[in-house]
Image (cartoon, rainbow, N blue to C red):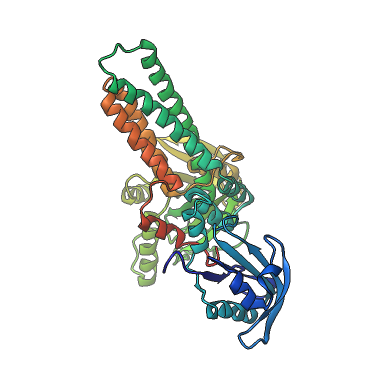
Amino acid sequence: MKSTDTIAAIATPPGRGGVGIVRISGCDLLPLAQALTGKTPGSFKARRAAVADFVAADGQPLDSGLLLYFPAPHSFTGEDVLELHGHGGPVVLHALLARCVELGARLAEPGEFSRRAFENDKIDLAQAEGIADLIDAASQQAARAAVRSLNGEFSRSVRALTDGLIELRSLIEATLDFSDEEIDPLAETDRVARLKCLRTDLAALRTRAREGAALRAGLTVVLAGLPNVGKSSLLNQLAGAERALVTAIPGTTRDAVRETILVEGIPLHIIDTAGLRETVDEVEKLGIERSWKEIASADVVLQLVDARSGLTPADRNVVARLPAGIERVVIENKCDLAGLPPERTMQDGVVHLRLSAKTGAGRELLHDELLRIAGWRGHGEDALLARARHLEALAEAEARLAAAADQLAQLELAAEELRLAQQALSRITGQFSADDLLGSIFGRFCIGK
C-alpha cells in the first residue's frame, strides 16, 4: 500500500438507494475519467457536475449519472478526486468499482481518504476523528459537538494553548540564556500570570472535552443486587418498555439484558444482571458469573436494595466483592411499598437514591445522578466531542502545567515541564503521532471515508 496509489471505494452505505457514489482519489485522474466515460478531459470542469455514461472496457454501458471532478489541491484529500454519482444498487456500484480497479485504482482501506486528507494537511487529526464521530453520533447533541470538532473548534482551542505555551517557554528560555543579566522583576510576575491563565484555559477545555466524551461514549450502567430487588423492573422503567421478564420467582434473570437509552443526549448503556446469591442451579451459576464480569467492566454500578430493609448483611457481602474504585450508587427500590417518598441522601460517602421502579417515582433523581457521574453540566452547547486519547493528553498537559507552577523557582525544570505539556497537546492534533496510532485511528473509519 503506497500513498501514491489511486484508491477507489463505494462511499454510500450498503443496500439499495436512489443514488450511490463511488469515490476515487489519486494523481492525474482525468485520463481515468476519460476511460470511464469516453469524454475528452476538457469536458470536465472543476467542481461542476457533468452528465456522463459510465462504460465498460468493451464500450458497453454500466450506468449513467454524474461525474464530479475536484482537482488537487482543492479537494478533500488534497489530491485529484473523482466522484461517480450513479444509481444506488449494489450490483451497479460494484460494477463501477470493478471498472475503476481495471483502470489502475486499488480498493481503499478503511479511513484511507481521511488519512490522505490528514497527511496532505487538509485536516488535522482531531478534525479527522470528528468525521467518524459525526457519522457515529447517537444524538443531536453529539452530532453538533462532532461538527464543532470537524470545523476545527477543538483544534483551534488546542493550538491557542500551544501558542501560549510556546510564548511562555520563550520567555523562560530567554531568562536562562541571559542569566548573567539583571532580571526584571516584572518578567517573573509575567511568567506567573501567563502560567495561571494557561492553566485556567486548559481546565475549561478539559471540562468541554469531558462533556463531549460523555456524549460520544456515554456510561455503561450495571444493575446489580440480590434476587427480586427490582433490577429488571428498573430496566423496564428506564427503557419505557418491557425489555426484561419480571416475575416474583427469584432467579428469573439468567443472562445479561442490555438496553441503551438517551438522557439529554447522553447514551446510557443499561445492563440488567442475574441476582447475586449462592445457588446450586448450574444455569443460574453461569448467569451470576456473567453478572460479575459485567460489573467489572461497568462505569457505574447501581446496587439495588429493598427500601423496606435497607442494606442487609447479604447486600454488604455484595459490596465487599465489588472491584476497587468502581463508582457505586445504592438504589433503595420499592419506596412505594415502604410508604416513603423519593429522596437522594449520602451515607458513608455513597449516594443513596430512594425510588420506585414500578411506579417511576424518583426516576428523575436517577437521571440527574447518572448525568452528574458522566460530568454533564446540563446543556452541552459548547461541548467538544472527545475521545479517550484526547482526555489523556489534556490530563497529562494539566499535570505538567501544575508541575511547572511548582518549579518556577527552578526555571530549567519549569521549561522542561512546559515542553512536555506542549508535546502532550500536540498529540491531539497529530503534530506528534506515531504511525501505529494513526493506523489504529483510521482503521476504525468506514471504507470510503
Nearer the observer, 349 or 103: 103
> Residue 92: in sight, yes or no?
yes
**176 lies above or below 356:** above
**170 lies above or below 255:** above
> Residue 353: in sight, yes or no?
no
| Res. 67 image quadrant | bottom right
Quadrant of the rendering where the N terminus is positioned = bottom left
Rendered residue at 59%/79% (across/down):
94
Rendered residue at 40%/31% (across/down):
166
Rendered residue at 46%/63% (across/down):
256
Nearer the observer, 194 or 283: 194
Q: Residue furthest right?
A: 51
Drawn side of residue 399 relative to residue 245, left or right:
left
The picture places residue 64, in percent across and down from the top left corner, at 72, 77
The picture places residue 268, in percent across and down from the top left corner, at 53, 52
Quadrant of the rendering where the C terminus is positioned = bottom right
The picture places residue 315, in percent across and down from the top left corner, at 38, 49
| Res. 100 image quadrant | bottom right
**299 lies above or below 423:** below
**9 lies above or below 176:** below
| Res. 80 image quadrant | bottom right
The picture places residue 314, in percent across and down from the top left corner, at 36, 51
Nearer the observer, 38 or 257: 38
**How many numbered markers are drawn?**
0
Rendered residue at 49%/43% (across/down):
374
